[in-house]
Image (cartoon, grey):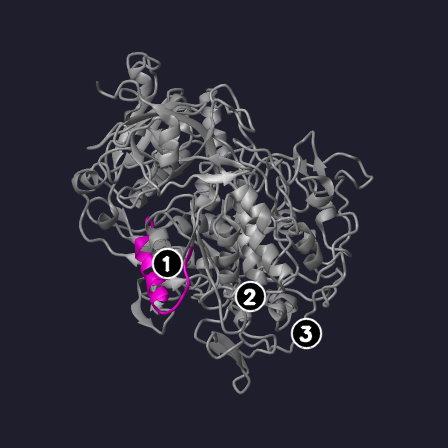
Amino acid sequence: MAENHPVGFQWVVEARERGAKIIHVDPRFNRTSAMADIWVPLRAGSDIVFLGGLISYVLSHNREFREYVVAYTNASTLLRDDFRDTEDLDGLFSGWDAEKKTYDPESWLYRGAPAHDNGSPGQGKRGKAPATTKAGHSPAGGGHGKDRGGEAADVGKFESDPTLQNPRCVFQVLKRHFARYTPEMVERVCGIPKQVFFKTAETFASASGPEKTGAICYAVGWTQHSNGVQIIRAASILQLLLGNIGRPGGGILALRGHASIQGSTDIPTLYDIMPGYLPMPFFEADSSKLETYIKKHSSRTGLWANFDKYMVSLLKAWYGEAATAENDFGFDWLPRVTGDHSHFGYWYDMLDGKVEGLFVMGQNPAVGAPNGRLQRSALAKLKWLVVRDMVEIETASFWYDSPEVERGELSPDTLATEVFLFPAAGTAEKEGTFTNTQRMLQYRNQAIEPPGDARSETWFMYHLGRRLKEKAKRDPRARHAGLNALTWDYPVRGRHAEPEVERVLQEINGWTVADGKQVPGFKALKNDGSTASGCWIYSGVFPSPGENKANSREPKGYLGHGWGFAWPNDCRIIYNRSSARPDGKPWSEKKKLVWWDEQGRQWTGLDTPDFEKTTAPDVKANLEGGHGVEALGGAKPFILHPDGVGWLYVPSGLKDGPLPTHYEPLESLFANVLYSQETDPAAQKKERRENSYAHSPDDPQFPYILTTYRLTEHHTAGGMTRTLSHLAELQPELFVEVSPELAADAELEHGGWATIMTPRAIIEARVLVTRRMHSLWVEGRRVHQVGLPYHWGYRGLVQGDVVNDLLAISEEPNVRIFESKALSCTIRKSDVWPGV
């Protein structure tokens, strides 16, 4: 966090000065480790064993916040008798289909929930798995937002045991599941000495109860794994057990590498979700009517009971007057997901000649993505390529300046790809919002006009859309009906006809169709076409003309209300109803956040209540017969879940199991000592000739662990930083970090050159021999880890080999992220220095 998020880390430093304990878990000793009270080095890729060990420590030592757990989680819920855990099936959950390599999640449901009559395996019906189950699991796509848990969990009909003693309750299943994740197992698999683990476990477990909380901050070191979603799930289980969700000083913070990565998932650049985490319709499952789609993706209770309001309002924002009840508000005009349309899915299609053209905006896949060699080769199969950037990045120059051209694999004389390079405006040269890691929209105003032909993304997309619409008008074919219906009437200003970005934000906020008035928030949205909103979770950011809350700059209180706008409803700590006891009183004076005002008969406090404001704590839940958030009653804080509680166990919505389980990385030096199932069974290696893997476990050709990371001085693929003289001077050269033990083992010299190789590529880098890179004892033997920053490429003021060429393309089963933090490699002293 100090290395890559230094501005945010100032608050960690301030907390430490006030007595907070800082624990840093990382294979490398870096700036954050130097500021921490405890540094925990671990083998890259063993995170779930470590987190599972912490969970097991909490459960075996009775350190859970019992009152919170009983009231606010599904710990008491009973599971079906046919559910089988990985402890029963040696690394698999019940419902695994080995032929299709997917799970049927039927047996994961709560006891009492009705069986799905969908022909899924194990139901005695047709014996054939559907393209998409009611739980939303589809072989075609990722996992963003396709399951609300409504029909899947059928929360109105389930059994529970508030004493947490029934062997089929979630709490007892959880204890059995993590029982083998002992301190000895952590030491054996992760390489963390037992004394370090005990100190860590006791320190973090102490951050619990009415008077204390603890937070977890993570970044792509947890995300970019073949089981990355389950790593983060393990963290959420730990935090729920300790009562650290929805309370000040608690939570799980995803540290974002860009100013608006959160914004790019809220209003997404992802293929399988629409704004506000509404799922894209799938070809086979969602090709029928809007009513069927809504029924599938909504729940009867909780916030997703209003799914129809969010969806219809979005369609009205997109298609305006053309969206009517008679034509399902234009639902048929939406494209359908027909396969793997993720980054890697279409890159493979590109390599196979199935894609003609590509727009690249705000990224640099030629050097910034896994297996760059494959990605550059795929670019050469295009007919045309459009790149928008502030400099000529490697993706724009691959056709005449790349390792493939240098090696003679590509020739500028024969390569048919036509490349268009458009100059882009920088941050200070445009206006608009960004949404940071705490869900806060902040408006930035334009400081200066962009130079020459440089233009903003808004300008480019608006005028591209305008030209496409003009062309579609001249073609009467039905295929253009959706494009012709699309509303695209933003006012423009200035000599370059720049769209007014505030009008876009007003559209996102939403309005009443009849009079054009802005809606005050998402609770005002309707399902009858009378309201429109471009993103329901952002509704309230621009509630009236001239009231751009994202541009507000008058902070009040310690949570900063009045500075920007946090979704939903300017709530700064999500699920904050759980910061109060079930009776509505704060857990303690020290940790109070929101509470029930008996005299005013409403929720009040230091934050906007993330709850129904007038629902008293003693209002009983009516999960079986009620509707919406009101059905949850007054003491169930997790309103996005249809049962209103935090999920220690996930009954539906994940493709690789309801509980986190340790699997080895797709490329590993070790066998899985917990189960015979080596890797996440639902993960995809995407293996082919151009994307080969080392043999696992323990390929003698690749005896070391490879992990990649970022530096403070450079930014991702380096396009924005390797062209700046002061940053280039601070980090002028690609280097590889190795421990003194590895240096001795591989005969490497500090300051010399090393060759690093994986089955995908070979690169060279300067050697940095340092104790920051820790060698560990794992499975009774010394294990060496190789660390490489990945910012260099073959353009800019400073250049270096492309580290991402070493990485494999793979897909985690839920969100299709790749594995970059734990692969295998070999390293040796270079025979000839580069350039000699």
Q: Earlier in the sequence, mark 1 or mark 3?
A: 1
Number of residues whose C-alpha sits closer than 10 Å to that of mark 1, classed few (under 14), some (14–19) or many (20 or more): many
Q: Secondary structure at mark 1?
A: strand
Task: From the viewer's side, name the closer residue of 813 and 611.
Answer: 813
Q: Residue 169, image x and y in percent?
A: 73, 58
- For residue 723, above or below residue 353: below
- For residue 167, above or below residue 86: below
Q: Amino acid at mark 2?
A: Gly
> Residue at point 61% right, 55% down?
56
Q: CA distance from mark 2 to mark 3?
A: 22 Å
Which mark lies nearer to you, 2 or 3? 2
**Magenta range:** 1-23
Which residue is the extreme one toward the bottom? 599
Marker disc for residue 620: 3
- Is residue 795 among the parts visible in the rendering? yes
- Is residue 327 among the parts visible in the rendering? no
Verify CB contact (< 8 Å) between mark 1 and mark 2: no
Q: Secondary structure at mark 3?
A: loop
Q: Which residue is mark 1?
A: 441
Number of residues whose C-alpha sits closer than 10 Å to that of mark 2, classed few (under 14), some (14–19) or many (20 or more): many
Say if the magenta span includes residue 394.
no
- For residue 613, above or below residue 198: below
> Residue at point 39% right, 59% down?
440
Number of residues whose C-alpha sits closer than 10 Å to that of mark 3, classed few (under 14), some (14–19) or many (20 or more): some
Q: Residue 580, image x and y in percent?
A: 54, 74
Q: Residue 194, image x and y in percent?
A: 53, 51
Q: Which residue is mark 2?
A: 243
Q: Is residue 279 shown left or right of residue 788?
A: right
Q: Amino acid at mark 3?
A: Lys
Q: Is residue 659 shown left or right of residue 808?
A: right
Verify CB contact (< 8 Å) between mark 2 and mark 3: no
